[in-house]
Amino acid sequence: MITPGLAPLLPALLLAQTAPASGGGSSLTPFLVQFVLIVAIIYFIMVRPQQRQRKKHEESLKALKRGDEVVTTGGIVGEVVHIKETAKDGGANRLDDRVTIKSGESRLVVERGRIARITGAAGTSSTAPSA
């Protein structure tokens, strides 16, 4: 039977009995190691390849030139007719430049950053030459 004076101390006594005899800090170390390993795996499998892909895409957009065939994020396929650079600070943010593309009989103005991919380079034809 527990006396009324010991009732508030009961949870503390139970915790003291279940605590390991060797310091409490060592039980946290394996958890921290696992956590760091999980974060490192996520970084090297998901984040880093995505950063590389984004950087490669931005470099290809900066190298965009007249005559390239492009596909916009909206799915419009066209040929680059004109590029108007809007950056006034020496071209630091070239993804805001305006690109005029010709698709069929229409001409559209899109931002350079809204181009999803470049399908054909200038001077190369996508069809086989006829003999």
Image: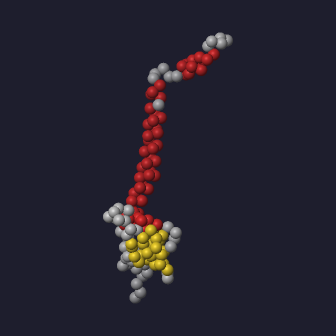
- Image height of 45 relative to 121, above or below: above
In the image shown, does 69 or 107 lie closer to the viewer? 107
Q: Which residue, as the protein is rendered here, is positioned at the far front?
A: 88
Q: How many marks?
A: 0
**Image quadrant where residue 56 sits:** bottom left
For image coordinates 36% across by 68% down, the residue present is 63
> x, y (%) of residue 74?
52, 69
What colour-coding does the image apply?
A: secondary structure
**Image quadrant where residue 9 sits:** top right
> x, y (%) of residue 122?
37, 76
- Image height of 48 relative to 97, above or below: above
- Image height of 56 relative to 42, above or below: below
- Image height of 131 relative to 75, above or below: below
> x, y (%) of residue 72?
48, 70
> x, y (%) of residue 48?
41, 52
Q: Which residue, as the protein is rendered here, is positioned at the far right?
A: 1
For image coordinates 44% across by 37% down, the residue present is 33
Q: Identify the image quadrant of the C terminus.
A: bottom left
Q: Which residue, as the protein is rendered here, is positioned at the far left?
A: 90
The reply to whether residue 119 is in sight is: no
In the image shown, does 84 or 3 lie closer to the viewer? 84
In the image shown, does 25 or 78 lie closer to the viewer? 78
In the image shown, does 9 or 91 lie closer to the viewer? 91
For image coordinates 61% across by 13% down, the residue present is 6
Q: Identify the image quadrant of the N terminus.
A: top right
The reply to whether residue 94 is in sight is: yes
